[in-house]
Amino acid sequence: MTAVVEPPVARLAALPGVSTASRVAAQADQARVTGRVLPVAPALAGLLPAAGLRRGSTVAVHGATSLVLALLAEATAAGSWAAVVGMPSLGLAAAAEYGVDLARVALVPRPGPELPAVVAALLDGVDVVAVHSETVQAAVARRLSARARHRGTVLLASGAWPGADVELSCSPSSWSGPSDGYGHLRERRVVVRARGRGAAARPVSAQLCLPGPSGKVTSAATSTSAAPNLALHKEATA
């Protein structure tokens, strides 16, 4: 009888903790089906390693509250619950225009010195907690990230956050719309860059309309007034 020798890749894939690319893709699909990844708008999916907000992760957003709203939109529209802490100037009308289901958002605009305790309690009960990070000390931030990881909640920080899994930053933007000195603002072009740890270690960037003509986030490549070279691309250097 002739012995059957498995190919090297098959033997390697059989080892504990080792996955093939197809298995990783299947696991990602299963994660989305089972709710381990909360959905985001298609224009934002390519910026996140799981093509959505992975439960238990911390995402830090620099430079644009509108990007925080855009990240909350699809998740709340799909039935997830969210809370926003320490953002008293958050515009609810703007949130609704981005697609956020306000009926599924709890607001704690001025938690004061109780902010860490408030965030910790919310991490136990909702799917996404967005928090203004300016007054959060580094040690407290790490403890809250650990709690989010343990509870399977997405922690969405507006501003710097030590140890964030993914960091998203917005470049200066330009508005378009008015012509001949009058009219309505139609869209705002931004470049969003993402980098982080693990699967997000390699920087990625996308040129987006935030908001687009419809009021929601869209890819600048799909905008009727976008230049043809506006598209998602990998950064050449870290």
Image (cartoon, rainbow, N blue to C red):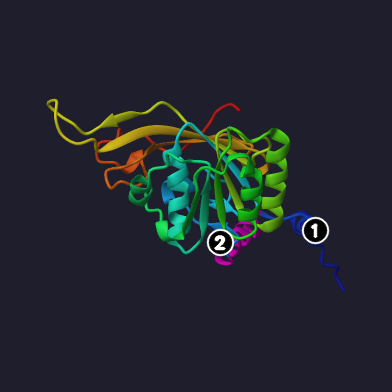
Is the residue under label 2 in contact with that under label 1 (CB below 8 Å)?
no
> Around disc 1, counting alpha carbons within 10 Å, would you say few (fewer than 14), some (14 to 19), or many (20 or more)?
few
Residue most toward the left? Answer: 180
Asked whether 139 or 181 is in front, the reply is 139
Question: Which dot, 1 or 2, sits closer to the camera?
Answer: 2
Q: Quadrant of the C terminus?
A: top right
Magenta residues (range) = 21-34
Q: Quadrant of residue 185?
A: top left
Asked whether 65 or 132 is in front, the reply is 132
Question: Circle 1 is placed at which residue position?
Answer: 11
- Residue type beneath disc 2: Arg
The disc placed on residue 182 is none
Residue 12, image x, y percentages: 79, 55
Describe residue 123's horizontal placement relative to residue 4 as left or right.
left
- Residue type beneath disc 1: Arg
Q: Is residue 30 magenta?
A: yes
Asked whether 61 or 231 is in front, the reply is 61
Describe residue 78's horizontal placement relative to residue 236 as left or right.
left
Residue 134, image x, y percentages: 58, 32
Q: Is residue 170 magenta?
A: no
Mark pair 1, 2: CA separation: 28 Å
The disc, 1 or 2, on the residue closer to the chain's N-terminal end is 1
User: Which SS type dominates the magenta stretch?
Assistant: helix
Question: Circle 2 is placed at which residue position?
Answer: 32
Describe residue 116's horizontal placement relative to residue 71 as left or right.
right
Residue visible at 58% across and 26% down in the picture: 237
Residue 235, image x, y percentages: 53, 31
Please indicate, yes or no, whether residue 229 appears anywhere in the rendered image: no
Residue visible at 66% across and 48% down in the picture: 117
Q: Quadrant of residue 231?
A: top left
Q: Quadrant of the N terminus?
A: bottom right
Residue 14, image x, y percentages: 79, 61
